[in-house]
Amino acid sequence: MIEIFNLSKTYYMGENVIHALKNVNLNINEGEMVAVIGPSGSGKTTLMNILGCLDIPSDGTYRLYGEKVNCMRDNQLADIRNRRIGFVFQNFNLLQKLNALENVELPLIYRGMSARERNRRAKAALESVGLADRLDHKPSELSGGQQQRVAIARALVSDAPIILADEPTGNLDTNSGKEILSILKRLNNKGSTVVLITHNNNIAMNAKRVVRIQDGEIIEDREVS
């Protein structure tokens, strides 16, 4: 599903040159649950942004379903993000003026789906994460764990086969964090490919495979026993 060859990302900040990624090679198969782990500044967020088509590499190749992503135009990348990738962020990224149902419907609006079908799909997605009774609640009326479940429902509603979760438990208490990880594992067991970005070893151990990154390079890639 995901193939990365000799991928590098370099940032130029005035006279400073930052090598965020250095000749990274990585393959992720359909249906895997992979944790990418590393400390702050290791390059894991840069890697996630490239995997999610939010950024492009300076050098190297990124293929998604065999298509060479790093040569695509902005509108093509936006289409991939909308149809193939669901995002779950640490800060939830929900619109405060919209209720849970409306937040989950948003990706479907961009796809031009009818209001009736959007409503049906969004309700089903919220029900799948245990929020069928919170459809009309705005983010300020939900706990952190509930807001993250809304974000997961939004990632699911487009039937995107890939879920990129960037520190999804970072702003949650321990119990809420366990609930979110349980949902992600359940989705993976149903066939979704999950890439979990984290700095926490205990979080990473919930995946089936751990890729450790440091100073822009992959230093370990192993299955979790």
Image: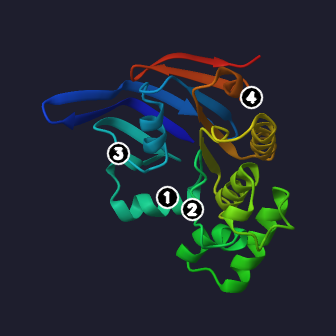
Residue linked to disc 1: 80
Give the residue pinned by disc 4. Answer: 206
Image quadrant holding the C terminus, namely top right
Q: Is residue 221 above or below residue 100?
A: above
Q: CA distance from mark 2 to mark 3?
A: 18 Å
Give the number of the mark in front: 2 or 4.
Answer: 4
Disc 1 residue type?
Ile
Q: Earlier in the sequence, mark 2 or mark 4?
A: 2
Rounded to the nearest angstrom, the CA distance separating label 2 from label 4 is 26 Å
Residue beneath label 2, please? 83
In front of the other: 9 or 5: 9
Q: Is residue 86 left or right of residue 213?
A: right
What is the CA distance from the residue labelled 2 to the residue labelled 1? 5 Å
- Contact between labelled residues 1 and 2, with CB atoms less than 8 Å apart: yes
Q: Position of residue 76 (x, y in %)?
A: 40, 62
Q: Quadrant of residue 129?
A: bottom right
Mark 4–mark 3 distance (CA, rounded to whole Å)? 29 Å
Residue 7 as seen in the image, left or right of residue 83: left
The residue lying at 74 percent from left, 28 percent from top is 206
Q: Which mark is residue 146?
A: none
Q: Earlier in the sequence, mark 3 or mark 1?
A: 3
Given contact means CB atoms under 8 Å apart, are the residues at marks 2 and 3 in contact? no
- Which picture quadrant has residue 102? bottom right
Decide: few, some or many residues near mark 1? Use Cα within 10 Å; few <14, some 14-19, many ≥20. Answer: some
Q: Which mark is residue 56?
A: 3
Label 1: which secondary element: helix
Question: Do tag 2 and tag 4 residues touch (Cβ < 8 Å)?
Answer: no
Amino acid under disc 3:
Ile
Q: Residue at x 43, y 24 (%)?
A: 42
Tag 4: amino acid: Asn
